[in-house]
Image: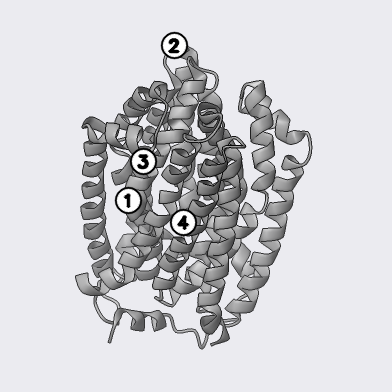
Amino acid sequence: MTLSDSAVESTTAAAPALTSRDVLRTWWPLAASWILMCVELPLVSAVIARLPESRVSLAAYGGVIMPLALLIESPVIMLLSASTALARDQARMRFLNRVMFVLGGGFSGLHALVAFTPLYDLLAGGLFGLPPEVREPGRHGLQLMIPWTMAIAFRRTQQGVLIRHGQSRAVGLGTLTRLAADVAVLGAGLAIGTVRGSLIGPLAMTCGVVCEAFSAAWLVRPVARSLPAEAPGPPLTRASFARFYVPLALTSLLVFLGLPLASAAMSRMPLAVGSLAASPALNGLVMVFRSGGFAFNEVVVALLDRPGAVAALRAFARRLALITVAGLAAIAFTPLGGAWFAHVSALPPDLVSLASVALALLVPMPALAVFQSWYQGTLVHAHRTRGITEAMAVLLLVMGLVLAAGIAWQGAPGLLFAAAAMTTGNAALVAWLAFRTRPIHRA
């Protein structure tokens, strides 16, 4: 018996058919958590824009600090999906926690190596091609985020246990803790008023995820105690877990390679510093509308074995995609977009118009996030994760082609080509995932 045999762990013959209300009941606490988490991005960029040296600080935050931090932590991101799919008993939970500490500790060490050695100069100056004035603020911000990867690995593993065992509301409570810590640090930065935003923003995000990790540790305790010592089925082994998880880790790595790829391309196109400075505000706003789609992934993993699940989940995905795209379009194609970037994000006037045009190019992104989660969750549930890795490779290929065209043409600001690359790349990703899940949905 192999790990994929554990897909039959939940006996579904006697379970009632899945309804839209069931999907909504599982989805909304996760969506609330994702929305609160994604609010962090525009909140941080809005505060950075109101602190000294705002343009350079925003460029450092959006151009190197977050792309590098997210790229380094990317192999631990999918611990949430792994824990949701596999944490059936205390023995498996202990195994997952051991894996979490190894991955989190190892990649935290890599983060420190990048932040405190000449490797940073090689990446920021060579690979990213960042303007000289952006590099040192970026280094200092990255150094403040050393605990980031370990905290992310820990809290995502515990949150997967909560989701699997019907405690998805607890995930939202943890995210509230994170946001409260963010607000406290950002508020202190605004009150002091003399510290650069490239320091305040990373410090706030680090404090936030550490507080959320402690919250997850507290909330998971009663759930962990209630688990059986060992559930029926084959035990998790290093080999079986590696077959399941390595494609997922490669998937997240390929996804987050898109961020430094976009930063490197924008640094080589017209209006480099302005494009890098506007990108955090732009990406933060779009992420808020994509957040509901991201939350749908774990819903699919948790519910797909219920009778009638394919029809109920597909219908929910279509409605969610329509609502989220309509919401973002209402901002992008009305004066609300300019007002957001001018008054909430506090961007300079020249960057307000640039971000507004780029936002229009990103309107399809919320729907693409929903359908990515629908197809990706199906593949994770079926333990066929190789197709996800293939889709991420398609994403990077398409993004690379669009960005290369922008570098060769040199006829438009880099932010516009980065937005176009994100939309076309994610459309190609969803198309590939749809192709790979067709046999599963038919079955």
Circle 2: residue type: Thr
Mark 4 touches mark 2? (CB < 8 Å) = no
Mark 4 or mark 1: which is in front?
Answer: 4
Circle 1: residue type: Ala
Q: Going 52% across and 57% down the picture, which residue do you hit?
A: 398
Disc 1 to disc 3, how far (Cα)? 13 Å
**Residue at the disc numbered 1:** 153
Q: Looking at the image, is mark 4 or mark 1 earlier in the sequence?
A: 1
The residue tagged with tag 3: helix, strand or loop?
helix
Q: Looking at the image, is mark 3 or mark 4 earlier in the sequence?
A: 3
The image position of residue 333, as x and y in percent, is 77, 42
Position of 200 compared to 92: left or right? right
Q: Looking at the image, is mark 1 or mark 3 earlier in the sequence?
A: 3
* Mark 2 surroundings within 10 Å by alpha-carbon count, few (fewer than 14), some (14 through 19), many (20 or more): few
Disc 4 to disc 2, how far (Cα)? 39 Å
Q: Looking at the image, is mark 4 or mark 2 earlier in the sequence?
A: 2
Most extreme residue toward the front, as rendered? 408
**Residue at the disc numbered 3:** 69
Q: Going 64% across and 40% down the picture, which residue do you hit?
A: 358
Disc 3 to disc 4, how far (Cα)? 19 Å
